[in-house]
Image (cartoon, helix red, strand yellow):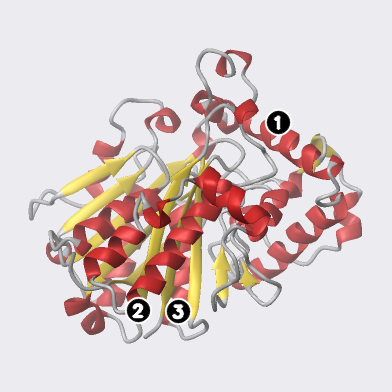
Amino acid sequence: MTSPVAVVGFAQSPCRVREDVTTSGVEMLVPIFAEVFGATGLTRADIGFWCSGSSDYLAGRAFSFVQAIDAIGAVPPAMESHVEMDAAWALYEAWVKVLTGEAEIALAYGFGKSSGAHLRRVLALQLDPYLLAPLWPDSVSIAALQARLGLDAGRWTEKDMAAVAARSRAAARSNPQAQVSGDVAVSELLERPYVAEPLRAHDCAPVGDGAAAVIIASEARARDLCARPAWITGFGHRIDSGALGARDLLAVPSAAAARLACTAAAAARAAGASGHSAAGASGHSAAGASGHSAAGASGHSAAGASDGVDVAELHAPFSHQEILLREALGLGDGVDVNPSGGALCGNPMFAAGLARIGMAARAVMSGRAGRALGHATSGPALQQNLVCVMEGQ
């Protein structure tokens, strides 16, 4: 493994229902590529590796990501890869490429046109194809089951959920890319009808189209491209069982274990460990513990203390999931959570997780945060989780 890697650029398209955009995403990607290149002074020829995140299921055709490559251009030839999920995982692949010296600069991007399909039904296709998917339980209904479990267990109230939504919308007023924003009273939200009891519309992320792009660079290039790079000190992801009945829906062990991986990586680096050891600690086998063993050892706040995190951007598509994630990631009251408004104010499928990392990186690059955490999730009821911790140096 080589020297550290940093985020040096981020751009995101406004999240909204866009009738002028096809499912290929090219119309959304070209402007944000131009924006991030303009901010860093780079050109397409400078990118050593490209990696995208999208979904053929959402687009309704096989190999839909190939059309998106039109946004990159055919010349010069590009080394390109793709993940069939949120582009936060594409960023992880790009990070490995830069960390191992296969590229000095990499760009990860994600896009999704959720309005082109019945999103709640499309997401049912990610369920177990033998027992669950044939019943067509949509994503909102599954989240409602999780929310009801938390209410019955006394973990939160409907007022707590509404408070998350109200705070998110207020924060999103300063985010021009947000789909919904504005001041609203918790009492007013609680008077609104259910869409899937106990969830109301404000408890669920809106359906919208959008794209995001993040550029990362090696230590040799990062300081030339950004006045204050967001150095990645930990990067990890874990997955829990796909069988909803086989896991506790009120625990998020994969998120806790991913956070522990980041903590282990930062500790190893601080202790003077080699680049190889630090990187290994933030990868798949960090801390030598699975998500289940990590959570079992430490309970709800398996990640421990906030470890100096000032800002956390959490990919929580439902209001109660922010509460779960704060506990699993060990984020105290002093951490500014989702100052962008988060996914409740704009959740472009397959770009929202990458955008959370980008917004967290932007907080570091602007000097608003010394250390920030970006989080992404995938699968039903917070099944798979990724954590990226960044800091200014």
Q: Secondary structure at mark 3?
A: helix
The amino acid at mark 1 is: Ser
Res 245 quadrant in image: top right
Disc 2: which residue: 271
Mark 1 closeness class: few <14, some 14–19, many ≥20 residues within 10 Å: some
Residue, x 86% and y 40% (percent of image)? 152
Disc 3: which residue: 364
The label shown at residue 14 is none
Q: Residue 207 location, x and y as percent? A: 59, 43
Q: How many marks?
A: 3
Most distant residue in the left direction? 76
Q: Is residue 63 left or right of residue 180?
A: left
Kindly report the distance in space between the C-alpha atoms of the residues bearing marks 3 and 2.
23 Å
Residue, x 71% and y 51% (percent of image)? 319
Q: Nearer the viewer, residue 373 or 229?
A: 373
Q: Is residue 280 left or right of residue 119?
A: left
Kindly report the distance in space between the C-alpha atoms of the residues bearing marks 3 and 1.
36 Å
Residue, x 67% and y 58% (percent of image)? 327
Residue, x 78% and y 67% (percent of image)? 183
The amino acid at mark 3 is: Val
Q: Secondary structure at mark 1?
A: helix
